[in-house]
Image: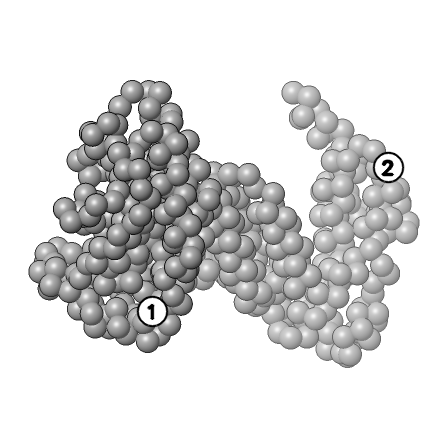
């Protein structure tokens, strides 16, 4: 086929796909897909039955007087094909489909399983796959067929002047009885593949829940969790499909962090951040990189902020301190806020954290101050007030006690390191 003819054919295929909104492929002589658009992924357990379905279609049906054919299979998966010619030479066929002529009900699934000698355990997988397929009524089938006829005649790729179409039916029951052992074994292994997929997911979520960053790095390094572990759920739009899966992942990671003992305020903040980034992603590659970032940040969040090891009283105390760090804090204020005895709170806090409440408050405030010292536009006084110190001299004293140098010296050292 000449390059000009191929360009013309590509335009014709794009027109067909845009009009029909159904998976469109071109089969050339030798039965090969040489162009496709809107690919719908066949679930792993069904590939032995459905993956090569187009290759079984009788595109040049011996009894057909028309170049337009409606293919009806015993799987209830239908196709429309249009044969293209250059003069009398057959170039190949445009195939539109699969599509369904009616709703994929449970009764229909039963009929498909019985009529095609399929295993009953495939029913839920069949249902999910069929729900992803377009429903096309008879009128739309006629419209698509007429559209194909018009395009091929306009492009002078038809040797038929009449745009009639004929029906061809297929029954795959006997063929499925003779399926190779390799296909049967592959199908039998599918439950194990699915189980393994979910086992790995649970293992990943368990690592996140524990905040084990080292184990997470090893898990991802070993390739235990790949970017293609789950099939597309929106097959005609790979980017949208991957976004949907990444949204689901964000939800699962959020729940893992919650189980890991992180306060919902922090979880909501990081979850919202990633939701925005997911929607703004412009490519599948960006989403894959974002997915890795999500694993890392959720794991770090649990590692830094988990309160799971502590008793209910101490969890409440720490949560109150973290959420009110910029306000006045004292043992008395915290005890009243969480309805606890000052004496018991002080004793229990020291026992569970190995430090006093005041030391813990100062530690968190100084940690926040260290991060803010990166901002050269904030004065030392500003930073002191932001992290909860009304007395800048007391702030400097506590900072020096914690870090060995004053805030000004710390900032100068940082600048010197950055310049070098």
Percent from the top left, x then y, of residue 345? Answer: 73, 74
* Residue 203 can be seen in this image: no
* Residue 283, label in figure: none
Q: Which mark is residue 124?
A: 1
Q: Secondary structure at mark 1?
A: helix
Question: Percent from the top left, x then y, of residue 139?
Answer: 42, 57
Which of the 4 quarters of the picture holds residue 405?
A: top right
Q: Is residue 285 left or right of residue 185?
A: right
In this rendering, position of residue 22 left or right of residue 186: right
Q: Residue furthest right?
A: 391
User: What residue do we see at 39% from left, 59% from top?
Assistant: 138
**Above/below status of 180 relative to 15:** below
Residue plotted at (78% across, 79% down): 339
Quarter assignment of residue 255: bottom right
Q: Which comes sooner in the sequence, label 2 or label 1?
A: 1
Q: Nearer the viewer, residue 375 or 183?
A: 183
Residue drawn at 76 percent across, 51 percent down: 365
Residue 319 drawn at (x, y percent): 71, 65
Residue 44, x across and y down, in percent: 28, 56
Q: Nearer the viewer, residue 103 or 5?
A: 5
Q: Secondary structure at mark 2?
A: loop
Could you classify mark 1 by the number of other residues whose Cα lies within 10 Å: few (under 14), some (14-19), or many (20 or more)? Answer: few
- Quadrant location of the C terminus in the rendered image: top right
- Disc nearest the viewer among 2 and 1: 1
Q: Which residue is mark 2?
A: 379
Check disc 2: other Cα within 10 Å, few if <14, some if 14-19, many if 20+.
Answer: few
Residue displayed at 12% across by 55% down = 182
**Disc 2 to disc 1, how far (Cα)?**
63 Å
Q: Could you tell me if residue 298 is visible in this image? A: yes
Q: Residue furthest front?
A: 162
Report which quarter residue 15 is drawn in. top left
- Pick whichever, 305 or 277, lies toward us: 277
């Amino acid at each position: 086929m000449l390059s000009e003819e191929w360009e013309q054919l590509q335009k014709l295929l794009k027109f067909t796909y845009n009009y029909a909104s159904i998976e469109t492929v071109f089969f050339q002589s030798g039965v090969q897909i040489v162009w496709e658009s809107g690919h719908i992924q066949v679930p792993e357990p069904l590939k032995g039955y459905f993956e090569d379905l187009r290759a079984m279609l009788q595109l040049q049906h011996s009894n057909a007087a028309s170049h337009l054919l409606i293919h009806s299979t015993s799987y209830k998966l239908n196709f429309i094909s249009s044969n293209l010619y250059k003069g009398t030479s057959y170039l190949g066929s445009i195939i539109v489909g699969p599509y369904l002529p009616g709703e994929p009900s449970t009764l229909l699934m039963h009929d498909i399983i019985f009529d095609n000698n399929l295993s009953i355990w495939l029913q839920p997988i069949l249902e999910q796959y069929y729900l992803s397929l377009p429903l096309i009524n008879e009128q739309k089938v006629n419209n698509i067929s007429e559209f194909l006829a018009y395009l091929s005649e306009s492009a002078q790729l038809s040797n038929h002047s009449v745009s009639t179409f004929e029906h061809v039916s297929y029954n795959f029951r006997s063929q499925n009885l003779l399926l190779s052992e390799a296909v049967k074994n592959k199908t039998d292994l599918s439950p194990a593949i699915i189980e393994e997929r979910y086992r790995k997911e649970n293992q990943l979520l368990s690592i996140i829940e524990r905040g084990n960053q080292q184990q997470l790095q090893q898990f991802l390094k070993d390739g235990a969790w790949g970017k293609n572990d789950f099939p597309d759920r929106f097959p005609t739009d790979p980017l949208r499909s991957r976004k949907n899966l990444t949204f689901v992942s964000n939800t699962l990671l959020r729940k893992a962090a919650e189980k890991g003992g992180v306060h919902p305020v922090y979880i909501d903040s990081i979850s919202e951040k990633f939701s925005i980034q997911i929607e703004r992603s412009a490519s599948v590659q960006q989403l894959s990189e974002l997915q890795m970032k999500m694993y890392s940040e959720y794991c770090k969040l649990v590692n830094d902020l988990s309160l799971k090891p502590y008793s209910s009283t101490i969890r409440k105390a720490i949560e109150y301190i973290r959420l009110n760090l910029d306000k006045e804090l004292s043992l008395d204020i915290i005890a009243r806020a969480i309805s606890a005895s000052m004496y018991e709170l002080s004793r229990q806090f020291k026992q569970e954290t190995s430090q006093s409440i005041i030391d813990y408050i100062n530690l968190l405030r100084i940690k926040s101050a260290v991060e803010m010292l990166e901002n050269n536009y904030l004065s030392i006084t500003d930073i002191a007030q932001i992290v909860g110190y009304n007395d800048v001299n007391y702030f400097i004293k506590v900072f020096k006690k914690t870090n060995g140098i004053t805030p000004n010296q710390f900032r100068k050292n940082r600048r010197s390191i950055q310049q070098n």
